[in-house]
Image (cartoon, rainbow, N blue to C red):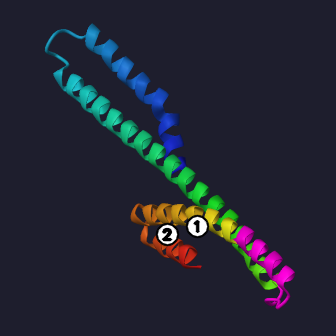
Amino acid sequence: FMEIYNEIEENRPKVETVLAHGQEYLKKAPPNSASNLQQNLRTLKQRWDSVTARANDKKIKLEIALKEATEFHESLQAFVDWLTNAEKIITSFKPVSRVLDTVKQQIEEHKVFQKDVSAHREIMLALDKKGTHLKYFSQKQDVILIKNLLIS
């Protein structure tokens, strides 16, 4: 799309020059003699304005979509990194001890870990919400990718 957008921008001076020359010609022409040219200039201006407005709209929407997708991907990657680390922490826990002091220490370690998990629960819910939002505003092949990312 950006190639087309850049092409539109490259042609802007040409179109503006044609419109300006047309207006100059209309000023010099006798009244009622250039109504066809006047109509053609009006049509050109309307269509040019329409194309540039739609192109700008599309560009803005694409920039917003790119920003949202990038933020989602970065947040998801950070969450996956945390999740991988959390799995390592879980596997490093020692079996439950039968010694009172050791059990108390294990309970404290577990409470700290549980607080961390609870804090990241909100992040997971926000990621799920953002992913669902992206699914509704994406193309079909992107929806499948987003679903797979959320499932994993």
11 or 133, which lies in front?
Answer: 133
Q: Position of residue 145 (x, y in %)?
A: 53, 74
Main structural element of the magenta stretch: helix, strand or loop? helix
Q: Tell me where residue 97 sits by quadrant.
A: bottom right
Give me the residue at 50% from left, 75% from top: 147
Q: Gap in Å between the C-alphas at discs 2 and 1? A: 25 Å
**Residue furthest out toward the front:** 100
53 or 17, which lies in front?
Answer: 53
Left of 97 or right of it: where is 116? left
Magenta-span inclusion, residue 39: no
Give me the residue at 34% from left, 33% from top: 49
The residue tagged 1 is 121
**Residue furthest out toward the left:** 32
The residue tagged 2 is 142
Task: Give residue 151's mark.
Answer: none
Q: Which residues are magenta?
A: 94-113
Q: Position of residue 105 (x, y in %)?
A: 82, 76
| Quadrant showing the C terminus | bottom right
